[in-house]
Amino acid sequence: MILSIEDLTVSHGENTIVDNVSLTIGKGEWVALVGQSGSGKTMLSQAVGQMLGPNLKASGSVVYQDQNLLQLSNQEIKQLRGKAISYIFQDYHGSFTPFMTISQHMDEYLQTHGVKGKAQRETMMREALLSVGLDDSFTKRYPFQLSGGQLQRASIAIALLLEPDVLIADEATTALDSVSAHRILTLLQELQQKTGCAILFITHDWRHVVRYADKIAVMKDGEIIETGSKQQLVNQPKHAYTRQLIQAAPTLPVRIQEASKS
Ligand SMILES: Nc1ncnc2c1ncn2[C@@H]1O[C@H](COP(=O)(O)OP(=O)(O)O)[C@@H](O)[C@H]1O
Ligand SMILES: [Mg+2]
């Protein structure tokens, strides 16, 4: 296992937002986390990298290489973020400052992570941008000089700069049109195969779940109510709520029949 979440609870004062959740993510595994909005998916994923807001508390453990990430100091978790765990978000605009070029963003990120040598940093930047389909000409551009899809790809390039072991994508494709979303997902799949990184993919879109996930975890009211391989969960959902979610997915019944025939 590359990441083991055990008995993770997130609370806000008296309120329990994520309730005693356990979930394991294997090396190179694509895990889809689904469930209606407000069920705690974002809070769960943010707790993993100590990204929670100031009034939220996390307890339990998130084990990565024999250490509990929840117990690391600010400084220690900062060092690990980007290397061990990297995030991409729906709102990629928030990752960019308008008056800095793409390469300035990337260079600052690499310097923060202690990558020495300008030449090495430049090579890493070029390779990361190329891997998301952006050529050299993009390095000198400002964020407003990129289309939405290109900027999202640049944010993914930054998230992948240090070849993280786990990539957490929180509704990263929700705001994109279906062609751009497909391009991003194919890209993540390629990178997953190339670098062996695991992906925790939070989505509402069952078409993406069916196409890309190895494993599915279903969240409801702060709890993970069902986890299983994609085949298991789609073809033989145990929980009534999982059945409901699947039935509500418009394009899915055809695929379930296809899958269950084989
Ligand atoms: N910063 C916050 N402080 C307190 N409660 C929050 C905060 N962010 C989200 N919540 C609450 O936590 C619950 C789970 O939210 P969230 O994890 O964002 O759900 P999801 O990502 O599944 O849509 C919701 O009830 C939401 O209102
Ligand atoms: Mg969310």
Image: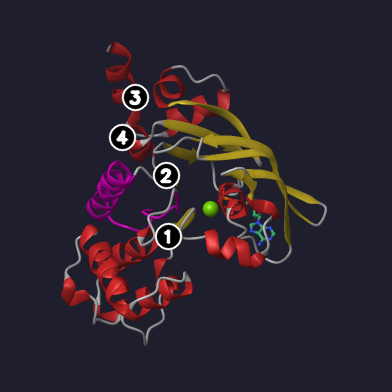
* Residue, disc 4: 211
Q: Nearer the viewer, mark 2 or mark 3?
A: 2
* Residue, disc 3: 253
Secondary structure state at the residue bearing disc 1: loop
- Separation of marks 4 and 1 at Cα, in angstroms: 20 Å
Residue at (42% x, 24% y) in the render:
234
Q: Is residue 189 magenta?
A: yes
Few, some or many C-alpha atoms within 10 Å of disc 2 (few <14, some 14-19, many ≥20)?
Answer: many
Q: Which mark is residue 199?
A: 2
Secondary structure state at the residue bearing disc 2: strand
Do callouts 1 and 3 mark residues in contact (Cβ within 8 Å)? no
The answer to whether residue 255 is seen in the rendering is yes
Name the residue type under label 3: Pro
User: Which numbered disc, 4 or 3, marks the residue that appears first in the sequence?
Assistant: 4
Segment tinted magenta in the rendering: 166-195
Do callouts 2 and 3 mark residues in contact (Cβ within 8 Å)? no
Dominant secondary structure, magenta: helix
Secondary structure state at the residue bearing disc 3: helix
Name the residue type under label 4: Arg
Q: Is residue 21 left or right of residue 169?
A: right
- Separation of marks 4 and 3 at Cα, in angstroms: 14 Å
Few, some or many C-alpha atoms within 10 Å of disc 4 (few <14, some 14-19, many ≥20)?
Answer: few
x, y percent for residue 105: 37, 77
User: Which numbered disc, 2 or 1, marks the residue that appears first in the sequence?
Assistant: 1
Name the residue type under label 1: Gln
Q: Nearer the viewer, mark 4 or mark 2?
A: 2
